[in-house]
Image: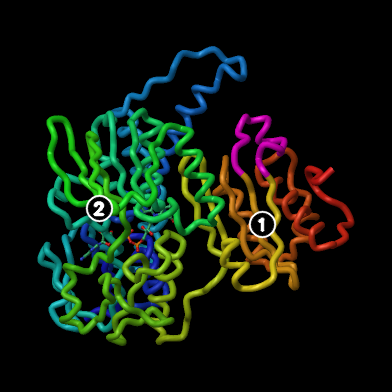
Amino acid sequence: MMDVVVIGGGPAGMTAALRAGDLGAKTVLVTRDEFGGMAANDGPVPVRTLAHAARLLRDARNLDRYGIIAGEPMLDYKRLLGRVREVVQEVRAHSTFSAQLKDAGVVVNEQCGVARFTDAHTIETKSGLRLRSDKFVICTGGVSRRLSVPGAELTVTHSDAWGLTEVPSSMIVIGGGATGAQVASVFNAFGSRIMLFHSGARIVPTEDEEVSAAVSAAFRDSGIEVRENFGVVDSFEKTVDGVRMLFSKDGGREQAEATFAVVAIGWAANTACLNLDRASVETDARQFVRVDEFLRTSTPHVFAAGDVTGRMMLVPQAIQQGFVAATNAVRGATMRVLEGAAPIGSFTDPEYAQVGLTETQARAAGDVVVAKVCLDSTTRTIIDGRTSGFCKLIVDRETRQILGCHVVGERAVELTQVAAVAMAGRMRVDDLAQVPLSFPTYAGVLGRVAAKAARRLNLQLDWQAGELEGQ
Ligand SMILES: Cc1cc2nc3c(=O)[nH]c(=O)nc-3n(C[C@H](O)[C@H](O)[C@H](O)COP(=O)(O)OP(=O)(O)OC[C@H]3O[C@@H](n4cnc5c(N)ncnc54)[C@H](O)[C@@H]3O)c2cc1C
């Protein structure tokens, strides 16, 4: 009998197993495929590598602006995929998790196929492993949602898109959320003709409205055909060299054709194979495992962490939840998941990122001041020729604390990390304005936008770091 069995070897599962082992519990980790989960094998690491290649292509096309004479860059997609594999392996090899798990005495079983409950204290894996345990932590992540319309089997998901052996001449992307926007941006840079269909009024809908508008405009400028409010998909048909999507809106029928149709309409929980009913573990309507504030499921000795809970589906949150779930599994339910500044960003071109409340959310919640600086007026972006986009700061009028930061443009994701640290440290906006951030840097825009907000609040600054604002 084990103390803790962790199911799933992604960021949540690895952390949960390590924490349980560190706390002295007899722990086993079982995972269907390779160690690392989606983060290492199918999500951020490979995607970021492709996005980096897209960025290099863009930069190579701009070399002549800086007097560097080079020919038109050409993409060898097979070699790029080789590089992606290399990166994935290198990241995995340098992950300290394997060694740490070994040191903590955790037994790791990779490539065991799906695990399923046979009763509330027993699981069996496809490979034939049978484990009984006092506690369980479910960390099986999520899967891409699929459309259920005729011909849906002709569509692919982001995973298939990364696995293509050559760049398709055209691509329909259905869904303008983070994953769809990423697929569209990367393959647009690689030369595919992209049609991005989004059912709602604005793409990247969880971002600030101004961010959505800016990303949408930039996508259109770069040649992506963006169709917001496109209607509903009726069906797909095979064509000689690809696929046809039939869709309708307000009684009218339309169609679009491309080499591939990629569906990126969201994320569902990966719980179908787990036989959760055998352990009386409840799920919600989208099959995400229901958990309380201690990440305890409806069966008190079974916990869940990461994407499978349907909360914020990101690596840092999966890691944090894995830690909390394992702590509670071993020590009893005492630790809650931290709520705090959580930066989110995407490596599209242009990048966009956020932390905290959007302007609409903040205005609905109270009295705020909003300041914005456009990147066509900051020194570093001018030097680098990356002048599109903006940085927006939302500040509470009374406490002067930063409630939100939203950025579109070069290095947006890195920039919001700085804002997140300021928010986590509960800095007042006038304090941020007086930090001597280096010049000329991308992060320097934060000092400038903070100074702008401080001035709107009639706050006296002893001095203002970095670039001057409002001269
Ligand atoms: C295209 C894309 C880009 C992304 N980019 C980012 C990003 O830039 N930054 C970021 O923070 N996040 C990003 N994410 C999200 C991130 O990858 C996930 O939030 C994270 O991987 C969740 O970790 P997890 O441990 O919960 O699940 P996963 O990483 O999905 O791991 C689940 C594990 O469970 C195993 N498993 C599943 N079912 C079973 C079973 N029945 N039995 C045994 N094992 C099982 C799987 O093999 C896998 O190892 C991205 C996701 C996608 C799809």
Mark earlier in primary sequence (1, 2): 2
Q: Which numbered dot is residue 251? A: 2
- Evaluate if marks 1 and 2 touch, with contact meaning CB atoms under 8 Å apart: no
The magenta stretch is 374-389
Taking depth in this image into account, of 228 and 388 the one nearest to the observer is 228
Q: Is mark 1 within 8 Å of ligand 1?
A: no
- Quarter of image, ligand 1: bottom left
Amino acid type, label 2: Gly
| Residue at the image position 81 percent from the left and 44 percent from the top | 468
Q: Which numbered dot is residue 393? A: 1
Taking depth in this image into account, of 392 and 72 the one nearest to the observer is 392
Image quarter for residue 265? bottom left
Please check the rendered image and state whether residue 439 is part of the magenta-colored stretch, yes or no.
no
Q: Position of residue 12 (x, y in %)?
A: 37, 65
Amino acid type, label 1: Leu
**Scheme by which the image is coloured:** rainbow
User: Does dot 1 land on a helix, a strand or a loop?
Assistant: strand
- Compared with 130, 446 (above or below) is above
